[in-house]
């Protein structure tokens, strides 16, 4: 049998933890003491940062003063608004009951959030995701066979989609 030597590390209680007046032993004096490397010094903050903030505040103050006096600020460039934003703004201006539309938007967002939670809860139930996937594949196949395979069925589907679109948007 081989002999094994085991060195035990003993932790002695010291009054230096309790009494701050007791002298501390140096790390080099005690071979049982383990020291950690010192942390690097904190990063030096740039001295020009307050200068940049001051310059930015001055520029903003000039722009506010120019707008207050009716002048165009020198540094403010007129940006072209995208077409979709113009369309949304025009549609919002045409809405008579903005309170109802806002309420419907909030309710829609809450319903979407709730439905994602419900779907994730259903997804955690064993066997249900697999069954739902098979049902989805089966329905997609049935829909494709019923509406997309033959030309008369495709034309009927397109007419039905156009009629539904006209019912929703309104005849123009």
Image (tube, rainbow, N blue to C red):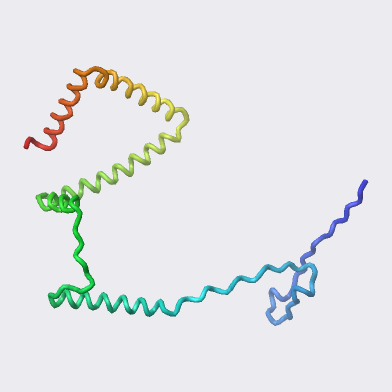
Q: Is residue 172 above or below residue 10?
A: above
In the image: residue 94, left or right of residue 111: left
Residue 67: image x %, image y %? 17, 74
How many numbered discs, if any? 0
Farthest residue, direction left: 172
Residue at image coords 16%, 53%: 86
In the image: residue 85, left or right of residue 42: left
Q: Nearer the viewer, residue 99 or 157?
A: 157
Residue 32: name its quadrant: bottom right
Q: Nearer the viewer, residue 49 or 5?
A: 49
Residue 42: image x %, image y %? 54, 73
Residue at image coords 20%, 48%: 103
Residue 114: name its quadrant: top left
Residue 71: image x %, image y %? 14, 75
Q: Is residue 106 above or below residue 158?
A: below
Q: Is residue 146 above or below residue 47?
A: above
Q: Nearer the viewer, residue 33 or 77?
A: 77
């Amino acid at each position: 049998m081989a002999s094994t030597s085991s060195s035990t590390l003993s932790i002695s209680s010291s009054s230096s933890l309790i009494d701050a007046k007791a002298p501390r032993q140096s790390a080099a004096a005690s071979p049982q003491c383990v020291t950690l490397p010192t942390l690097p010094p904190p990063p030096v903050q740039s001295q020009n940062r307050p200068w940049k903030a001051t310059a930015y505040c001055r520029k903003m103050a000039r722009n506010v003063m120019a707008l207050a006096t009716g002048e165009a600020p020198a540094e403010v460039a007129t940006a072209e608004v995208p077409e979709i934003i113009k369309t949304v703004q025009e549609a919002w201006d045409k809405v008579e009951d903005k309170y109802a539309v806002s309420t419907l938007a909030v309710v829609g967002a809450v319903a979407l959030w709730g439905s994602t939670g419900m779907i994730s809860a259903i997804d955690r139930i064993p066997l249900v995701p697999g069954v739902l996937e098979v049902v989805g594949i089966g329905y997609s196949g049935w829909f494709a066979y019923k509406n997309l395979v033959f030309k008369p069925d495709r034309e009927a589907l397109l007419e039905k989609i156009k009629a539904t679109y006209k019912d929703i948007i309104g005849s123009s």
